[in-house]
Image (cartoon, rainbow, N blue to C red):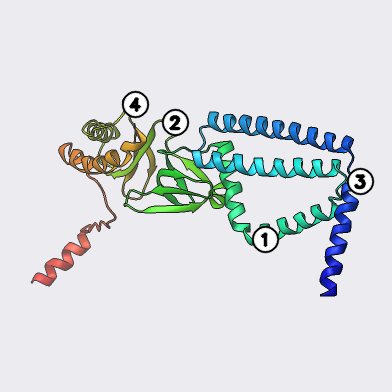
Amino acid sequence: MDSVLTGVTETSDLWETLASSVTLHAALYALLTLVIGLIVVRVVTVLLRKALGRARADGRIVTYAVAGVRFALLTVVVLIAADQLGIPITSLVALLSVLSLAITLAVQTVLSNVAGGLVMVATRPFSVGDIVTIGGDTGTVEEIRLTHTCIDTVSGTRIILPNGTVASEKVTNLSALGKRRVEVAVSASYDAPVSMVRKACLEAVAAVDHVLSDPAPAVLVTSYGESSIAYLVLCWCKPTDYLSVYYPLTEALRESFLRNNVEMTYNHLNVHIIDTPERMKDDEKALH
């Protein structure tokens, strides 16, 4: 009981000492500092919100970013005002530092993802609706949040990628240029002239929908194999039409080769038997 009374008395003495040390001049300075600080915080958060709005950032990311900056600035303003009043803030700063370190270690992964989200807001490697490849996964970006990004694949699955991973991975944006090139490799016999093969390939391209005329389709000779010539058929389409062009074109090439009497080769071995006079004599003896 005595220890409790002693603690109360010491606390009371501390507040009395603090109250006696706070002058009207210091209180006015602290109040002025607080008012100016609040105005600065207001201006900074408004400018930050406008900047993120011009960057077309996700609404949730804007809210979290502005709230975090406001909290940090308000903490600084309160500490400065307390210092103006003569309140010792060294211990308070040390305590806040320890608490900040503990919280940072506890949510290190979350903070890494948040940092990745902020990097994405600043760099804008892709937007909602873009077709991207991230770490080997290809799909359409459906949602960008502060901590993760959602992409939907053509197989009907949703992949949720942490923004920390997205920020460190190689990102391929297939929609950024507004068009995508379709490449289909085929092979044809050496007996078929290159001009005939090119004609058959271009007929197949013309039979497929959603192919862009500019850039124009092209057929290139890529290599000469042991039993065939390798060709590469190139055409362009909108990113959203890629699969609607790739698979029909693959099928149309087979049909066009058949119509133009072009042999689509495959791995095989041709054995040629040459009859010599000596062998013909041996065969005749064997018959008799």
Instruction: List the single residue furthest toward the top.
Output: 214
Determine which residue is flagged by label 4. 216
Name the residue beneath numbered marker 1: 105
Q: Earlier in the sequence, mark 3 or mark 1?
A: 3
Residue type at mark 4 is Ala
Q: Residue under label 3, please give it.
A: 21
Place residue 263 in its image quadrant: top left
**Amino acid tagged 3:** Ser
In the image, what residue type sits under mark 1? Leu
Residue 12 or residue 171, whichever sits in front: 12
Q: In the current view of this chain or complex, which residue is farthest to the bottom?
A: 1
- State whether residue 263 is above or below residue 54: below
Percent x, y of residue 151? 41, 48
Residue drawn where x is 78% and y is 57% of the image: 95
Q: Are marks 2 and 3 in contact (CB under 8 Å)?
A: no
Mark 2 and mark 1 in contact? Answer it, CB < 8 Å. no
Q: Which residue is mark 2?
A: 177
Location of the N terminus by quadrant is bottom right
- CB-based contact (under 8 Å), mark 1 and mark 4: no
Mark 2 or 4: in front is: 2
Task: Identify the residue shown where x is 33% and y is 48%.
Answer: 154
Compared with 149, 49 (above or below) is: above
181 or 5, which is in the foreground? 5
Q: Considering only order in the chain, which callout, 4 or 1, is on the residue closer to the N terminus?
A: 1
Image position, residue 229 (x, y; %)? 33, 43
Q: Name the N-terminal-most of marks 2 and 4.
A: 2
